[in-house]
């Protein structure tokens, strides 16, 4: 929280210097409420050790970041899965847009990287935060949900033949074909 006050204080100083002509004409970008809330969420992150966050566009672009998840249990044990997050300026009133960059054989993630997670859709509420979303994604890898699928074929195999599902996940993660679809290595 203290970090937020420092940011606002620095912005005020820069604005005052610019208005006095002492800032070299540099303008101060006013942060949206969404940026301020996201800054707070990120400063309070409490991620599992198997999750990391990075900012490929630098620290000045908090609204676009990546999260890497390496499950330590379940079907996806030891795989590494990258997700992109795009956060709207009206966050937290709108859920972040999340895509899986890693092609994965999963009932709740389609081959284009779309993620089926209820809190990213109809169950999103402004009291939820980035930490909640990351834990939700982590949970998808420890407990895939065949009842609300995006990849219907994977969901059916999980429901009807969990052993075959496990074989398909391992084949996909080690870099191979499942049916007609090739999956790059992610383990």
Image: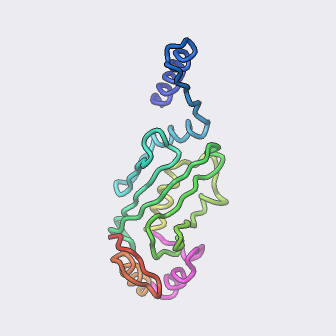
Q: Residue at x 47, y 42 (%)?
A: 42
- For the C terminus, the image quarter is bottom left
Q: Residue at x 61, y 36 (%)?
A: 32
Residue 153 is drawn in which quadrant?
bottom right
Q: How are the colours assigned in the image?
A: rainbow
How far across and how far down the image is residue 156, in percent?
54, 84
Residue 152 within the segment the image draws in magenta: yes
Q: State whether residue 146 is above or below residue 140.
A: below
State which region is magenta. 143-162
161 or 53, which is in the foreground?
53
Q: Is residue 118 left or right of residue 143?
A: right
Q: Residue at x 53, y 13 (%)?
A: 21
18 or 154, which is in the foreground?
18
Residue 114 within the segment the image draws in magenta: no
How many numbered markers are drawn? 0
Q: State whether residue 85 is above or below residue 38.
A: below
65 or 58, which is in the foreground?
58
How far across and how far down the image is residue 27, in percent?
55, 25
Q: State whether residue 128 is above or below residue 35.
A: below
Q: Is residue 94 left or right of residue 175?
A: right
How far across and how far down the image is residue 170, in percent?
36, 79
Question: Of all residues shown, which one is farthest toward the front?
Answer: 24
Q: Residue at x 57, y 49 (%)?
A: 87
Q: State whether residue 183 is above or below residue 19.
A: below
Residue 176 is drawn in which quadrant?
bottom left
How far across and how far down the image is residue 49, in percent?
34, 54
């Amino acid at each position: 929280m203290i970090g937020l006050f420092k940011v606002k204080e620095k912005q005020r100083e820069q604005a005052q210097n610019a208005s006095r002509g002492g800032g070299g004409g540099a303008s101060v970008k006013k942060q949206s409420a969404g940026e301020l809330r996201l800054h707070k969420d990120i400063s309070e992150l409490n991620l599992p050790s198997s999750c990391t966050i990075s900012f490929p566009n630098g620290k000045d672009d908090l609204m676009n970041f990546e999260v890497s998840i390496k499950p330590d249990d379940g079907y996806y044990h030891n795989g590494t899965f990258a997700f992109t997050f795009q956060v709207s300026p009206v966050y937290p009133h709108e859920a972040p847009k999340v895509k899986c960059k890693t092609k994965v054989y999963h009932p709740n993630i389609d081959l284009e990287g779309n993620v089926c997670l209820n809190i990213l859709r109809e169950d999103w509420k402004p009291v939820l935060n980035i930490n909640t979303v990351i834990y939700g994604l982590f949970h998808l890898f420890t407990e895939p949900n065949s009842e609300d699928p995006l990849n219907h074929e994977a969901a059916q195999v999980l429901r009807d033949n969990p052993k075959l599902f496990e074989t398909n996940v391992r084949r996909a993660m080690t870099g191979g074909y499942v049916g007609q679809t090739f999956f790059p290595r992610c383990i």
